[in-house]
Every structure is written in C-alpha cells, then in structure tokens.
Amino acid sequence: MAIISFDPDTIIEYVPEYGGNRDSDEPCVVRLRFVPYSRVQHYSRILAARTGGVSDPLKAAEAGQAVQRRQFVENVEQVSGYYIGGREVTDPAEFYDTADTELVLEIVAAMESQARLSEGQRKN
C-alpha cells in the first residue's frame, strides 16, 4: 500500500480527542499544518542552540517550552469551539497559553504525525 502524506501548505481541520471533544455536537476544531520530520528537526536544532551549555534544568525547560510554543503558533492557523468563560478564543497563541497541557500536547503530537492527524481530521 502506498503512503500518502499531507502537503505542507495544506490546512487540516483537526478535532482533538481530549475530554470527549470528538463526540461533542460543537467540538473544538484546530486548523493546522502537518509538520514534516524536516521541520521537527528544525525546531530540535533551535532547542539545542538555546540549551547548549545551559546546566540549569529550569532554564532548559523554559527554552523547551518557548520552542514548543513557537512551533505551535507557527503551525496552527486558527482555533474554534474553545471558550474561556463565555468568550471564544480563536488565536493560537492565546489558546496555547490557556489550554490544558494534555490538549496542547495532543495537538503538537498530531501535527507531527500523519497517522494521528488523519485519525482526528474533520470529516465533512
């Protein structure tokens, strides 16, 4: 069987599984790009450059979080169906800064995995 991947410029509507979201009548939907291995390596190199020679684990963790946030914000176009109080959050940076850790990690893992991304891809 052939392996078919996503074009890096294609925007995919991903519906996170987190908290039963996929079963919701109005699920949270994240419009994002697939991040191929070459881009994952790019972010890894940025992280290595920022943490090279850093012996403080807290500073290394902060650098890792900053690189992960950058990857998220650069590859998520828009969010819908995510609310803080009664206000819908559509901005990827605000979503990253306020969403549950497990939800953010699920989205990052999906953007790096064609199989996970296909599994959660919104079917119209």
Image (cartoon, rainbow, N blue to C red):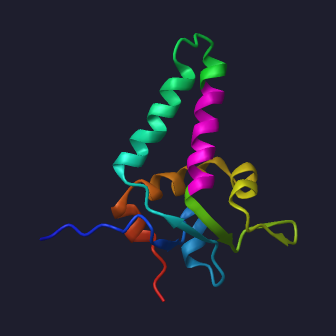
Residue 22 percent across, percent down from the top left: 55, 74
Q: Please report the residue visible at 68 percent of the width from the left and 59 percent of the height from the top.
A: 92
Q: Please report the residue visible at 51 percent of the width from the left and 33 percent of the height from the top.
A: 46
Q: Please report the residue visible at 39 percent of the width from the left and 40 percent of the height from the top.
A: 41
Against 70, residue 116 (above or below) is below
Residue 120 percent across, percent down from the top left: 45, 70
Residue range highlighted in magenta: 61-74
The answer to whether residue 41 is magenta is no
In the rendered structure, the answer to whether residue 80 lies left or right of residue 5 reads right
Q: Considering the image in quadrants, where does the N terminus appear?
A: bottom left
In the rendered structure, the answer to whether residue 3 lies left or right of residue 44 reads left
Against 57, residue 122 (above or below) is below
Against 13, residue 113 (above or below) is above
- Seen from the viewer's position, the closer of residues 121 and 38 is 38
In the rendered structure, the answer to whether residue 15 lies left or right of residue 38 reads right
Residue 84 percent across, percent down from the top left: 82, 63
Q: Main secondary structure of the magenta part?
A: helix
Q: In the figure, residue 82 lies in which quadrant?
A: bottom right
Across the whole image, how many numbered discs are drawn on residues? 0
Residue farthest right in this picture: 86
Q: Please report the residue visible at 57 percent of the width from the left and 25 percent of the height from the top.
A: 50
Q: In the figure, residue 8 lies in which quadrant?
A: bottom left
